[in-house]
Image (cartoon, rainbow, N blue to C red):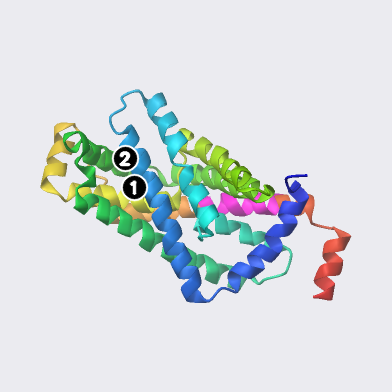
Amino acid sequence: MNFFSAAEVTANCVPMGEEKVKYPAYKTLFLGVLAGMLIALAAATSNTAVHDIANIGLARMTAGLLFPFGLAMVIVAGAELFTGSCLIAVSVLARRITLLRMLKNWLLVYFGNFVGSFLVAAACAWSGQLHYSGNALAAYTIKTAAAKCSLGFGNAIVLGIFCNLLVCLGVFMALSAKDQAGRVLGAYLPTAFFVICGFEHCIANMYYIPAGIFAAGIPQYAAKALELGVHTESLTWGNFFLANLLPVTLGNIVGGVALGAVMWICRMRGDPSTKRRNHAE
């Protein structure tokens, strides 16, 4: 067969998680920065494509067609993305790594993702990339960031849960393929679903919101946003970290770990071969 079964993918997640937590800190950090940049570039691309589309359904569909290539690039490049790293929980449940080692990996990857996304956000805002359509792209970027900062805490958690349930399912489906095309397609479809639905991804938001804040600080961009009636009262660094990034990250963790736990319970828990392997090691 040209693919791995669900049970095989779940089992393969265990040594994969073991390998990831053994990386030197600098390697984990650099691969995290790379992943953050790739996701941010996908976010910048989708924003550029949809900023002048008035029909919301068409805009979401267009973003859904483009953004998923960010996750595909992360997978093909072997970069480290925090949301996908939630599947390391399978290795913890299998008792092959400790919770502490997983948390250390998460912290390094998360920080690396933040650095990569933040750098792309700053570069896009300050380099003139947001000049499209007479600064309308900048106004759209500000509007998107302000909307994300206006989400209720509970809403952001739920949207984060659904998002990473789909992202981790995309990673899971990519791991089921034995060829490059299958890996890309597997990652693509669930990611497209989360983008079209408007679910919240903490790493993507590390681009969307800082880019909006930076743009709002540039006079010509701020003037265009004001001209188009964009409300920016909620667009602050405090709201970025506390009203969006915190609840979305918590939701992403719940969604990703929940998928990993369900797959482990249904595909590995109580498997005699797994018990023998763990006992031997």
The verdict on residue 33 being magenta is no
In the figure, residue 145 lies in which quadrant? Answer: top left
Pick the quarter of the image with the C terminus. Answer: bottom right
Q: CA distance from mark 2 to mark 1?
A: 7 Å
* Residue 203 x %, y %: 43, 53
The verdict on residue 256 being magenta is yes
Q: Is residue 46 left or right of residue 234?
A: right
Choose between 96 and 23: the one closer to the eye. Answer: 23
Residue range highlighted in magenta = 251-262
2 and 1 marks in contact (CB < 8 Å): yes
Dot 2 amino acid type? Thr
Which residue is label 1 attached to? Answer: 208
Which residue is label 2 attached to? Answer: 144
Residue at 60% x, 43% y: name it.
181
Dot 1 amino acid type? Tyr
Secondary structure under the numbered disc 1 in the rendered image:
helix
Category of crowding for the residue at label 2, using alpha-carbon neighbours closer than 10 angstroms: few (below 14), some (14–19), many (at least 20): many
Choose between 33 and 258: the one closer to the eye. Answer: 33
Dot 2 or dot 1, earlier in sequence: 2
* Residue 83 x %, y %: 52, 54
For the image, the number of numbered tags is 2
* Residue 157 x %, y %: 48, 47
